[in-house]
Image (tube, rainbow, N blue to C red):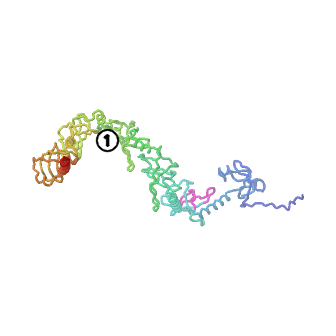
Amino acid sequence: MEQPKLQDIEIEIPKKGNIVTGKFLRKDDEYIYINFGYKSEGRIDIKEFDKLELKQLEKNQLIEAEFIDDSFSFPQLSTKKIKKLNEIKEIESKFEQKEIIEAYFLAKTKDRIIVNIGKKTLIEGFISRQNMEKDVFAKFYKKNEIIESLIISNQGEYELSTVEVDNIIKNNFFNLLKDKNPTHIEGKISNIKNDSIIVLFNNYKVEVQRDNLTWGNKKNLNVLFKKDEIKQFKILDIDYSDYQINLTLLEDKDDSTQYIIDSFNSKKEIEGTIINIKDFGIFVEIQNSYDVLIPISECSWNKISKNNISNHFRLGDKIKFKIIEFNKKNKNIVGSIKLTTDSPEKEFAKNNSNKVIEVLFKKELENIYLGITNTGLKVVMSKKDISWDNSKCEINLKNRYNVKLIGLSSMEDTLRVSLKHNSENPWNIFKEKYKKGEKYPDLKIISIDDFGLLVDEYEHCKAIIPKSYLDEEFAAASKVGLNISGIVEKYDDKNQKIIINQKKLEKIRQKEAINSFNKSQVEFKSTLGDLLKNKFNR
């Protein structure tokens, strides 16, 4: 085969600035080497490649580069221009699509912030003061700190805005919520303040206040949360018109808050450490997060003076108590030490049911009297338990009374007693005398008033015949001392009265008389017939 003549071979010599394509051959500590068909191998500064690009390089992989010069045996190439052109193309596309980009802080002047919007090459842009929120512009930025922005102009310089970014992210976030209508959402904690945390949801920042994060009153929320931690939040309410959302931390069955709730619901005894002592009570820390107030009244069944409370407790002591109040609205947790043991009153009541005890009553309230026993046990008596007669509801506070123990208060710290239970209820005795539905033929009228006739009484209990239950003729002729008959109609338990019906008994007697007469007439006719029959048969 005939070989071409040397003068016929055209050799294309690259010029400075030309774009060439070569195949990756190898690399060393300083350069990447490629074969691009001219001279020997071309070399590219290895610093132009990041770690990921270097890791992904494969033999014969095509690499585009700019021809710089051939003054050395290995021509100098560079990918900077290619990468920059590619990045500009990508940036222009994002500008057209109004897509949010990450800008890297470079410098700050009086009126603008200079940023780099290239990822691998330097492509400068700026954000003017009027295109940033006041606090965002005033913020101190570290070099290369990311500022999410939107390109608003590509004329000469790339001009960016953060205000537009916030609006887009905000709209996207709330539109997503409106579309999905979730009950809870997941976000990443981006910042932790003294009284709130900032959480990112699809790049939208939501501030969640301490009250919706924890029941504890620790000053530093860093104890409970960590930056970049992923957390679940429950949506309390959303205002789409004002772009407002209210969130609370979704309670985890394993977290400290749930421990408090379970302890409260089960009335379980728990342990904590005394962290503060005041004249009104002590503060106890539990789960390294929550402070529980134990009022002085809940520190012991025995009264503790506010001036003497420090003699009963020491900082750092471990104590056992029960949670007695758990207010979600006010974020209050209240505990009780004394409820971990039975009260002296409960111990007494266990073995002294229905026992008669001597009590000095010291205070009168609206419906009750308060007093103490000879041994100092607290006592309460309802005014309804003074006498079986409901009209008698007062006692003399200077006198001591023998009363019967009938139970404990709802808090199980006070004995419930009764004066009237020292004797049997007269009303029950009176009802035994007058059985409902029975006839009473020999009742004597004791007194007469506008309501009716009084025919019997026992202590405060009365047996009466109302005028409505009296025959009109008998009512007109009624006098004190006359006898009257009646049938027990009903019991008025409230007023402790036996209601007797004279009219009803009279009707019963009339009916009985008629029945008796009719029966006698039948018997008479039967006897007369027999006599006539016998006569005719003779």
Residue 133, relative to residue 314: is it above or below?
Answer: below
Looking at the image, the residue that sits furthest to the bottom is 155
> Does residue 104 show up magenta in the picture?
yes
Tell me the crowding category of disc 1: few under 14, some 14 to 19, or many 20 or more residues within 10 angstroms, Cα based.
few
Q: Nearer the viewer, residue 123 or 373?
A: 373
Q: Nearer the viewer, residue 86 or 320?
A: 320
Looking at the image, the residue that sits furthest to the right is 1
Image: magenta residue range: 99-123
The answer, for residue 500, to whether it is visible in the render is no
In the picture, the quarter occupied by the N terminus is: bottom right
Residue 55, relative to residue 402: is it above or below?
Answer: below
Q: Left or right: where does residue 214 sit relative to residue 59? A: left
Q: Left or right: where does residue 350 sit relative to residue 130? A: left
> Does residue 156 show up magenta in the picture?
no
The residue that disc 1 covers is 411
Image x and y of residue 292, in percent: 38, 43
Image x and y of residue 351, in percent: 29, 32
Q: Nearer the viewer, residue 59 or 330?
A: 330
Looking at the image, the residue that sits furthest to the top is 351
The answer, for residue 444, to whether it is visible in the render is yes
Q: Residue 42, located in which quarter of the rendered image? A: bottom right
Residue 255, relative to residue 153: is it above or below?
Answer: above
Residue 272, relative to residue 237: is it above or below?
Answer: above
Image x and y of residue 485, in percent: 15, 47
Residue for point 60% across, 60% down? 124
Q: Nearer the viewer, residue 467 or 308?
A: 467
Image x and y of residue 515, in percent: 20, 50
Type of the residue with mark 1: Met
| Element class at badge 1 | loop
